[in-house]
């Protein structure tokens, strides 16, 4: 009992010292119980926020964003060292998915329209656990962690972020925070599409021929490495200047989509077991024909109209429209002997644990295309918005030049 009290006291002193709260110590028998008061600096933090949807000009730096609080006992607060940006951050800045994400944040619709603001973007985080809820057993304060943040939660372009412990994983030891912030969102998305939806695993990938359409961006550069680590045969489409990058990551065969009709070039190759489509558009009209029929082959696209439908039609009608669209396409292609699927990002701390091991074993590396200090978040958005990604764009939040004072 005394030991437990001592631990509590030590932890309290640690927090008081770390966050500079003023404290006094009262005597109680032979034990000393600290009494502390919070300064205002403990309730606010620096962050980049948006107060309305729009272009890059809606991004605003503030030192007074609300400090996150633990709402559930299985949550952790992470001090953000680096954040990663994805195309969805640019889309969300413009209001993409606002209807269904608002419903997820406020299912009973109790809050006024616009209650999501000020909204913090940024879907990847690498940082240090600052506080754990009472039910959190797997992590402790001071652990270096990484995570992909669900789009309905406040993001990582802030000094602190609150996450479910199920979404968090111990960061690979071999990566810096900046490099680690390049992986979680694309890794969790590729895992969801390839493992959960297409059933690929370490055990069964060796005999599989996999085609990745759009292999040079965030999702593609991760997927190539994971599939090669599992022994799959990987064909990739990308533009000519990305060929060296994707070959360096292990791609067995590369097709330059800018050199002519890519479907003709791909049509001359042996058929595939799995296709991961990162490109969308009219791709699915010809890609389904590249699969081996009647063998369980699957096509999964990450470019779906789900959030667009709910934005245009409202949540109920949009979901119904989405269900009808995906079901009719799946049925149509099933009649031809191939499976048609939509893939989605799903937060998955357990998958990140496996990926962390693969990174530390040297099987997967982070592909960082551009790195910005915290003062240059609008420039980082600009970079992602330009497209033609060759890996990921990351932002340093704490340390290494990411000094808030510059903002
Ligand atoms: N459903 C979900 O939950 C989910 C989750 C994550 C991502 N996504 C979506 O998945 C897509 C990929 O994400 P990402 O993070 O990898 O995006 P990204 O980093 O922007 O990469 C996209 C890549 O595709 C290449 N590309 C463009 N047109 C192409 C074509 N016709 N053929 C082959 N490559 C082409 C681009 O390079 P070049 O133009 O230079 O060739 C770029 O490297 C995005 O549309 C994203 O919104 C969806």
Image (spheres, rainbow, N blue to C red):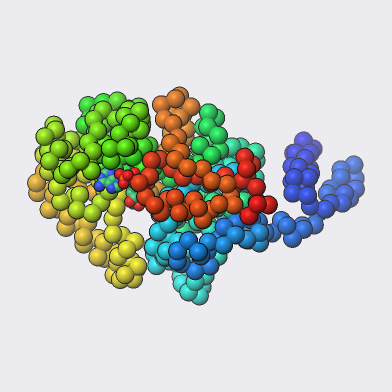
Compared across the picture, whether 391 is left or right of 34 comes to left
Q: Position of residue 87 (x, y in %)?
A: 40, 52
Compared across the picture, whether 232 is left or right of 388 comes to left
- The reply to whether residue 276 is in sight is no
Which of the two residues, 96 or 69, is positioned nearer the viewer here? 96
- The reply to whether residue 222 is in sight is yes
Residue sitting at 26 percent across and 61 percent down?
322
Q: Quadrant of residue 127?
A: top right
Quadrant into which the N terminus falls:
top right
Q: Quadrant of residue 140?
A: top right
In the picture shown, does residue 207 fall above or below 375? Answer: above
Which of the two residues, 44 or 164, is positioned nearer the viewer here? 44
Which of the two residues, 11 or 352, is positioned nearer the viewer here? 352
Which of the two residues, 225 or 170, is positioned nearer the viewer here? 225
Residue sitting at 55 percent across and 52 percent down?
376
Q: Residue furthest left?
A: 336
Compared across the picture, whether 386 is left or right of 76 comes to left
Q: Position of residue 227 (x, y in %)?
A: 32, 31
Compared across the picture, whether 372 is left or right of 17 comes to left
Residue sitting at 57 percent across and 46 percent down?
373
Q: Position of residue 47 (x, y in %)?
A: 60, 56
In the picture shown, does residue 376 fall above or below 99? Answer: above
Residue sitting at 45 percent across and 24 percent down?
361
Q: Quadrant of residue 99?
A: bottom left
Q: Position of residue 158 (x, y in %)?
A: 59, 53
Q: Residue furthest bottom?
A: 112
- Looking at the image, how many numbered discs can be counted on the residues? 0
Quadrant into which the C terminus falls:
bottom right
């Amino acid at each position: 009992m005394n030991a437990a009290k001592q631990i509590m006291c030590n932890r309290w002193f640690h927090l008081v010292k770390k966050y500079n709260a003023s404290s006094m110590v009262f005597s109680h028998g032979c034990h000393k119980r600290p009494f502390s008061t919070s300064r205002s600096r403990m309730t606010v933090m620096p962050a980049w926020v948006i107060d309305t949807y729009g272009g890059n000009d809606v991004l605003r730096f503030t030192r007074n964003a609300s400090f996150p609080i633990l709402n559930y006992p299985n949550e952790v607060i992470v001090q953000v060292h680096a954040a990663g940006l994805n195309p969805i951050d640019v889309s969300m800045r413009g209001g993409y998915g606002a209807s269904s994400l608002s419903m997820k944040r406020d299912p009973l619709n109790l809050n006024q329209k616009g209650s999501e603001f000020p909204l913090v973007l940024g879907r990847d985080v690498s940082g240090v656990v600052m506080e754990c809820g009472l039910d959190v057993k797997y992590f402790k304060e001071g652990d270096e962690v990484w995570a992909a943040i669900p789009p309905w939660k406040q993001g990582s372009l802030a000094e602190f972020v609150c996450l479910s412990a199920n979404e968090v994983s111990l960061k690979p030891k071999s990566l810096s925070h900046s490099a680690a912030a390049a992986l979680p969102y694309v890794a969790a998305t590729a895992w969801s599409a390839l493992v959960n939806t297409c059933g690929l695993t370490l055990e069964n990938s060796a005999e599989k021929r996999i085609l990745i359409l759009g292999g040079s961006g965030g999702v593609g550069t991760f997927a190539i490495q994971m599939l090669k680590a599992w022994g799959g045969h990987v064909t990739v489409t990308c533009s000519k200047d990305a060929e060296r990058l994707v070959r360096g990551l292990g791609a067995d065969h590369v097709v330059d989509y800018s050199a002519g009709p890519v479907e003709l070039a791909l049509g001359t190759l042996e058929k595939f077991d799995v296709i991961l489509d990162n490109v969308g558009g009219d791709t699915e009209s010809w890609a389904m024909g590249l699969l081996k029929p009647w063998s369980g082959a699957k096509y999964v696209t990450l470019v779906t109209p789900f959030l667009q439908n709910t934005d245009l039609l409202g949540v109920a009608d949009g979901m119904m429209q989405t269900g009808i669209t995906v079901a009719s396409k799946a049925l149509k292609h099933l009649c031809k002997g191939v499976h048609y699927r939509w893939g989605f990002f799903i937060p998955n701390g357990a998958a990140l644990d496996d990926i962390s091991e693969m990174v530390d074993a040297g099987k997967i590396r982070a592909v960082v295309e551009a790195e910005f200090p915290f003062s240059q978040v609008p420039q980082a958005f600009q970079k992602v918005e330009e497209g033609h990604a060759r890996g990921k764009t990351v932002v340093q939040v704490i340390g290494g030049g990411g000094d808030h004072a510059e903002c």
